[in-house]
Amino acid sequence: MAQANPSIPLGGGVEEVKKKSKIDSNNTLVRVAKYTGLRIITLGITVIIGIYLTILIANMGGYVDEIRRAQIREDVGARVAGNPTMRNLPAEVKRQKIAEMVAIEEKRYGMDQPFITRSARYLGNAIQLNLGYALKMNSNSGSKLVRNILLERLPPTLLLFATADIILFFISLFFALALSRQYGSFFDKVLITLTPLSSAPGWFYGIFLILIFASMLKVLPFGGMVDAPPPKTPFLYFLSLMKHMILPVLSLAISQIFIQVFSWRTFFLIYSSEDYVDMAKAKGLTSRDIERRYILRPTLPTIITSFALLIIGIWTGGPILETIFNWPGLGRTFYQAIGQFDTPVIIGEAVIFSYLLAVTVFLLDIIYAIVDPRVKIGGESSSI
């Protein structure tokens, strides 16, 4: 009978497996950390470039500075005209006083320095969300801090668009799956017919919805976030908020739902013709299990990508949509800031949307790895 070699510990195999598992785990953490750091640096550089280009565009290469100087001179002239003491001064002394007051105002706005220097300093402050004071706009509380103005408008925008996006995602997913089972049916042909309606933006349909439901039928409000005066109890406030959200959410849904259902239904049809789906049917799996495990799961990365692009596309129409519905969000604030040449608020809006876009792209990579095991973070190669 063969005897065991006493020099080899009986638990050697288990220890080797544990050691290898620990090494693999450490390698995975290092790989994920490197990938995360690289993505953060890449997205950060993209955000910085985008913000600086926005600064250049918002200032129109210095043209806005000329408009601002003219406005400063006009404001100073109005103050001098309304001051009896200044009116009685000799003309030469009055001109000198006006020049001094204009110089003080220009220095207060940092306009006594070259544009390149100001833009570089402003870029650093904008990245840190140290946005200073607005030139003309102010918050509901009267503050002119850009940070306060944007933070006050951010929750209404997130509430409106997050609600519209969630509703649009699940409704589109439901109808896309349903129509993929009924390819060529009457409802499928109706969807194909209605798909061109998604070529128009949400604010376009918002005008007609206001005309029909607010002006003609008088069943929904024209705009705003809540009734005036606002309801006092939380429950009535919530009901008023939901009533005011119906038309803007509906306009966003109408502008996107047909193309989303059509494209996702096409993805489902493509994946349902794969060989592994036929194999699953041959094994006797139910239709629900086949849809969930063999059609929906492989399609999720593509669906998530198209939905992320949809969210970004909806943001671009936010200023006009919120203005039409008088929604007190970032979009309407952005529209007002452009009309008033309020450069600090414009830059602040660009910073907020740049960060939201970067976070969306970063989370998209993480979600890919969660919903699809075939996607490996950091380019992991499978060993045979």
Image: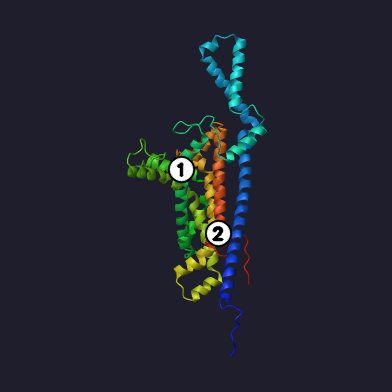
Name of the residue lying farthest toward the front:
6
Residue depicted at x 45% and y 68%? 288
Between 241 and 211, the residue placed more toward the observer is 241
Q: CA–CA distance between discs 2 and 1?
A: 28 Å
Between 10 and 85, the residue placed more toward the observer is 10
Q: Is residue 214 visible?
A: yes
The crowding category of the residue bearing disc 2, from other C-alpha atoms within 10 Å (few below 14, some 14 to 19, many at least 20), is: some
Q: Compare marks 2 and 1 and give the one earlier in the sequence.
A: 1
Residue depicted at x 51% and y 37%? 147
How far across and how far down the image is residue 315, in percent?
Answer: 52, 45
On the image, which quarter does residue 78 sit in? Answer: top right
How far across and how far down the image is residue 5, in percent?
Answer: 61, 83
How far across and how far down the image is residue 142, in percent?
Answer: 46, 31
Q: Is residue 286 above or below residue 76?
A: below
Q: Is residue 199 visible?
A: no
- In this picture, residue 353 sits left or right of residue 214: right
Question: Disc 2 residue type?
Answer: Tyr
Q: Quadrant of the N terminus?
A: bottom right
Residue depicted at x 61% and y 59%? 30
Q: Are marks 2 and 1 in contact (CB under 8 Å)?
A: no
Q: Quadrant of the C terminus?
A: bottom right
Q: Secondary structure at mark 1?
A: helix
Residue that mark 1 sits on: 155
Residue that mark 2 sits on: 368
Question: Disc 1 residue type?
Answer: Pro
Residue depicted at x 60% and y 50%? 40
The crowding category of the residue bearing disc 1, from other C-alpha atoms within 10 Å (few below 14, some 14 to 19, many at least 20), is: few
Between 49 and 256, the residue placed more toward the observer is 49
Q: Is residue 86 above or below residue 196?
A: above
- What is the number of the mark on residue 50? none
